[in-house]
Image (tube, grey):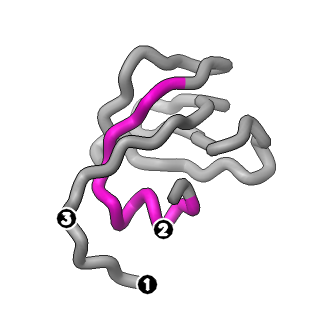
Amino acid sequence: MRYSNDETVEVDLHVHAESQKAMLLSTNGDEKRAEWTPKSQITHIGASKGESGSFEMKEWIAKKNGFI
């Protein structure tokens, strides 16, 4: 599925894990519903593994990963 919207959105997400290139994020803290999201596609604000925080990303990636 392709998204053409370049609008940036801010979503509150929980961080389950982090690798060098991606973060495992969910909207409700349920790791089974978490999605790996490339760090190149997000700007995270004050959140690390086990915490929740605000993340900015393009609307298309937020929709693709079910965050909005």
Any mark on residue 64, and which? Answer: 2
Q: Earlier in the sequence, mark 2 or mark 1?
A: 1
Q: Amino acid at mark 3?
A: Asp
Q: Residue placed farthest to the bottom in the image?
A: 1
Any mark on residue 6, and which? Answer: 3
Q: Secondary structure at mark 1?
A: loop
Task: Please rate how many residues cluster around mark 3, counting C-alpha atoms within 10 Å: few if below 14, some from 14 to 19, many from 20.
Answer: few
Q: Which residue is nearer to you in this view: 39 or 15? A: 15
Identify whether 61 is placed above or below 9: below
Any mark on residue 1, and which? Answer: 1
Residue at the location (59% across, 40% down)? 24
Q: Amino acid at mark 2?
A: Lys
> Viewer-nearest of labels 3 and 1?
3
Looking at the image, do the residues carrying marks 3 and 2 touch, with CB atoms under 8 Å apart? Answer: no
In the image, taking residue 38 as reference, residue 23 lies left or right, namely right
Q: Earlier in the sequence, mark 3 or mark 2?
A: 3
How far from the left and from the top, in percent, is residue 65?
A: 53, 61
Q: CA distance from mark 3 to mark 1?
A: 15 Å
Q: Which residue is nearer to you in this view: 59 or 22? A: 59
In the image, taking residue 12 as reference, residue 2 lies left or right, namely left
Q: Secondary structure at mark 3?
A: loop
Q: Is residue 23 magenta?
A: no
Span shown in magenta: 53-66
